[in-house]
Amino acid sequence: MRFGLTILPEYPWTEASRLWRMAEDLGFDHAWTYDHLVWGGLPDSPWFGTTPTLTAAALVTDQIGLGTFVSSPNYRHPVAFHRDVQSLDDISGGRFLLGVGTGGDLDSRLLAGGELTTKERVDRFQEFTLLLTQLRDEDHVTKDGTWFSARDARTLPRVRNVPVLVAANGPRSLRFAARHGDGWVTTGTKADTLDAWFDGLAVSRSILDEALVAAGRDGQAYPSYLNLDSSPHYSLESADLFAEMVTRAAELGFTDVITHWPRPNSPYRGLETTLETVATQVIPRLRTELP
């Protein structure tokens, strides 16, 4: 089991730099930030750009993985965004993790492009992801798409080691992740209780595993990332709750779990002391007990 920590891009860098350094010092395997223009969970909060934040984070850390949680086609074109991906991979020394998803509802409306149906947003996301992957793997890329096109796009310097981690909850997206992703990211489905949330995850896990077999892919080598804090409870409410949730995630075959830096208010209301206890006492124990 690997452990991740999300740091929302709401803090000025004079404050945020400490959090990113501490994430590495506490021994987390990867650290993430949201990729939104405005996040619906904190629509009135200060908010900073994702790629500059991760660039700065790369310069104050040495080993921890750094990722977008998650990037979307709501305000990005794959050709332009690929240059950011290349730069982040280079500056971080190969530590960048590219999480991609359909994106938030609020972001989807901000650029006044008109309301899209759920199907249209998923169609656009899949086209976005396929073109991003093609740009990563090829040079001189030409593509005529419904949502995004490219004309002889040059992609030097070549970057091949950036994993594309596909956020998916519904059956269609889960099957797409199994066919085209380098890993799976999930928030699970909405539920009123922790048990119901994990029951939903078990269903999603089964769909993904079947799709991996159908795609001829090795499920044992396919990483899966679970956002613990999309459950009805914030995972750092207590050290015991965190341990329980991680153990249940491992039983479902998840390879990675992600929590959030505690905030003074909701969402993710908690204490840094709990985070430190989890990092220094709970996670080392779980690393020895879990696969």
Image (spheres, grey):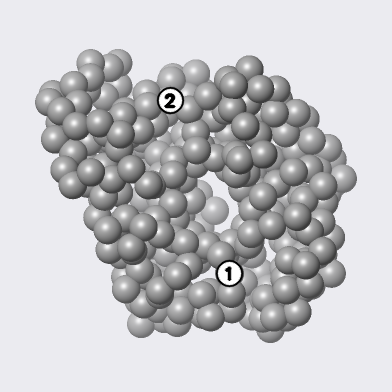
Q: Taking 194 as reference, is 110 left or right?
A: left
Q: Looking at the image, which is closer to me, 208 or 34?
A: 208
In the rendered image of this protein, does residue 124 appear above or below residue 51?
Answer: above
Residues packed near mark 2 inside 10 Å, few (<14), some (14 to 19) or many (20 plus):
many
Sequence-wise first label, 2 or 1: 1
Which residue sits furthest right?
195
In the rendered image of this protein, does residue 19 appear above or below residue 68?
Answer: below
Residue 51 position, x and y percent, is 31, 57
- Quarter of the picture containing the C terminus is bottom right
Residue beneath the point at 61% across and 48% down: 225
Residue beneath the point at 24% across and 55% down: 87
- Quarter of the picture containing the N terminus is bottom right
Residue 39 position, x and y percent, is 46, 51
Q: Taking 69 as reference, is 49 left or right?
A: left
Residue beneath the point at 74% across and 43% down: 253
Q: Taking 223 as reference, is 282 left or right?
A: right
Q: Name the front one of labels 2 and 1.
A: 1
The residue identified by callout 2 is 126
Q: Taking 242 as reference, is 135 left or right?
A: left
Residue 249 position, x and y percent, is 76, 50
Q: Looking at the image, which is closer to me, 220 or 256?
A: 220
Q: Looking at the image, which is closer to me, 109 or 209?
A: 209
Q: Tell me which amino acid carries mark 2.
A: Gln
Residue 260 position, x and y percent, is 60, 64
Picture quadrant where residue 214 is located? top right
The residue identified by callout 1 is 28
